[in-house]
Amino acid sequence: MSMDMTQFHGVFIEESQEHLDEMEHLLLALDPKSPDIEELNSIFRAAHSIKGGSGMFSFDALITVTHVMESIFDKARQGNFKLSAQLIDELLIAVDVLRKLLKSYAENSEIDWALVNSTTASLEAILDPNSQSKPQEVDDDFGFFEPLTSSEPQPLTHSLAKDQDIAEEDDTFGLFEPDVDTSDANCEVSTEGENVPVSDIDFGFFDDTDDSPADSNTPGSAALMNVSPSETVPPSSSSRPNFETEAHSETRTKQKTDSKPKPKAQTKSESKNKNEAAESSSIRVDIAKIDSLVNLVGELVITQSMLNLIGDEITGLANEKLHTALAELERNTRELQEGIMSIRMLPMSFVFNRFPRVVRDLSKRLDKKIELSIVGGQTEIDKGLIELLVDPLTHLVRNSLDHGIELPEIRLANGKPETGILTLKAEQKGGNIIISVLDDGAGLNRERILAKAYENNLDVPENPTDQQVWQLIMSPGFSTAEQITDVSGRGVGMDVVKRNIESMGGRLEIFSAKGAGSCFQIRLPLTLAILDGMSIAVGDQIFIVPLVNVIESVQPQSAQLKLIGNEQVLDLRDAYWPIVSLYQVMDLEPKSMQITDGILVLVETNNTRFALLVDELIGQQQAVIKSLEQHYRRVQGVAGATIMGDGSVALILDAESLALKINESLKQRIEYEK
Amino acid sequence: MRNEQTQEVDNQDTTTHEYLTFILGDEHYGLDIMNVCEIRGYEPVTKIANAPSFIKGVLNLRGDIVPIVDLRLKFDVGQATYNEFTIVIMLHINDRIVGIVVDAVSDVINMQTSDIKPPPEFGVAFDSQYLFGLAPVNEQMIILLNIEKLISSQELGLFDSTTLQSES
């Protein structure tokens, strides 16, 4: 497929995913006995939007399933149809199937038609008992669809042969509009039928323009067209010479760029139109635009602090006036900064909303009674983090459901209420977001974890504290579940969860009390773009060490320095720390070559720890991370750069790659000495 | 290479381009003004470890971290002194911004493509592959640089070779 096609797919798929989420959410909230008409309407609209979009791209599998779903909702909202809990289950399964199909389309992989057919069949079976004539009608629709989709070459030949005019392209887009606006269900079949060939013309068109500059008459381009039935090949190749003569390369590229945004805008406006009633008004903005705003405001803050410095030099009445004005400016810039940062933020409910479904499905499978309570769904968090949070949280929730909360009988025997409670909580504390997964289940079993740890030859400290024991479950390959279920227990889990969270710059903490439950707490920085760092100086340059890596800083005494094989190490509380001199790594002139004159910052990375020799500590500060690679290249030992209050650039150190500077043999000797 | 350039010169006879001219040592150079973002005074930069000496470091250009190259050091011409008169030309090349330090910026000239003569093979600090042509202005010869090629060259090592490949 050509590039522009995938571009439209991206928009469609993203929006369809949102529609599916919405459908699932509404279905879960729906009361089968007295369904709310507004909610049914919203579900119907969501199904309809997906169907409409799929029609434009001839995603037949999606059309097939959504069509039946749409019919069900249509009947339900007209009151001709009784909903039941079982039916909602079926519909939820259908939503899952749609997700799968959407994924297959997104990845261009094979469509599982067997799944499509079985889902449609089971959905049609739901429709069936209520009226005999209905399924007939449904079948008719499909009969109607297929000939149209397969007859697409005909209109394609026509329009392409008739007019190669660029204006024609606009015409076809004009054709979209009436369809787009008709959200009326009754004229569905006919609009859909028209939609399919029309959209295909466009795409046939695109393929042509894309191919012809590269290779005009090779079979490669014909093969591309083979995706649609074979008749399409002759018209497309015959249209190519016309193209070459009529439109010169210049106009061709112009038209290419001209036409590209249009269909995109169409698909967008289409679903927007239909959604307007259901959603609050919002716009989709490219994250890069927001980032550039964040950048600009950062600059504004720096300029303002420069003004403050200059203002101090002015004396007299002007100084006072200037200061009032500057104070005003400061307040405004701060508000502006907060406002722009908040654009990047999304409420945690974006993640939490998927869990009612998970809990519902799992509790059924595990025969447990579980109630989900969500607290603080409004807490806002950076969009970049939201996406990364889904997997670890799903894992933690599954773990709590499977291992944490007991079976109803056991709960009753232990004097607990039959229904277990799983709480998802998000809150903001200082510069951190804390997300907790709490359950009132059995809690972690200290003895069993320890036994398992010894069995797996894990490194267990002597007389471990509870905290240390809980940390053990995050070691690779650890699982105490007596039997492996399909829910969890394969032991590939907590270590991955921990790694994922750490890669976001966060921490995972575990609290547990036997018999009372456990709590998994994820602590995250508010945003990805800002890093808590310690600023240090070497020579005349300032560096930032990420605070996550810093354990402590010491002023070394000469008694603490030992020589191991010609290399100096720090002997601190019976542990040896290899020393990495930053001035050597960064090729700078230090204030003093003597280690005892400097400061050692103890740094810990995933695999190793070392002491970083610097001239002095300056302080702790938040640093806005900027990329060095954007205009320059990767620099070893450096993770990025940031801009200091005075406008100068400071480099952010990458502890992982600094650790590579440690001599391998020294590391081994330190191990040995221990 | 040479063929391509002369062809280009022939084809676009009537078009005029604007060139920013600057001084490096004793020679006058010109570069396509469309590549220039801005011209500013030299400011202290943050040194980058293990970079060649002609890469002075990086500085903050309105929130972008931009590398600064001293062409005088790279091509061993002029005096590499830094004072309030030292000039940095910020260039915009392949979506990247790079600053170059030169001795002075002199003028903006309009040059018809037909007036541009092929570049000399020698006698210039730059390798001839980075040259675009010679332009006579007021009995003076201005050497026009193919600045995109120079900045993105392996020789300067400003960009990772991998990123270069993906961009080209």
Image (tube, rainbow, N blue to C red):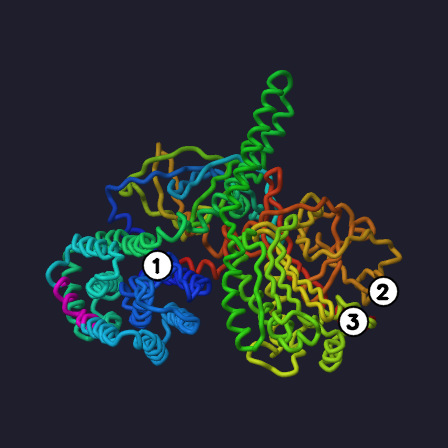
Q: Provide the residue span drawn in magenta.
A: A148-160
Is residue A22 among what the camera can see? yes
Circles 3, 1 touching at the beta carbon (< 8 Å): no
Q: Residues within 10 Å of mark 3 (few under 14, many from 20)?
A: few
Q: Residues within 10 Å of mark 1 (few under 14, many from 20)?
A: some
Discs 3/1, front: 1
Among all residues in the image, which is located at the extreme top? A317
Q: CA distance from mark 3 to mark 1?
A: 67 Å
Which chain is home to disc 2?
Answer: A
Image-quadrant location for residue A483: bottom right
Residue A104 sits above or below residue B65 on the image:
below
Task: Quickly name the residue at label 3.
Answer: A671
Disc number for residue A574: 2
Percent x, y of residue A306: 59, 32
Amino acid type of the residue tagged 3 in the rendering = Glu
Q: Residues within 10 Å of mark 2 (few under 14, many from 20)?
A: few
The residue shown at (64%, 46%) is: A622
Q: How many marks?
A: 3
The residue shown at (27%, 68%) is: A58
Is A150 covered by the magenta stretch?
Answer: yes
Discs 1/2, front: 1
Is residue A638 among what the camera can see? no
| Quadrant position of the C terminus of chain A in the picture | bottom right
Task: Quickly name the residue at label 1.
Answer: A41
Q: Nearer the viewer, residue A432 or B101?
A: A432
Q: Nearer the viewer, residue A302 or A247?
A: A302
Is A348 covered by the magenta stretch?
Answer: no
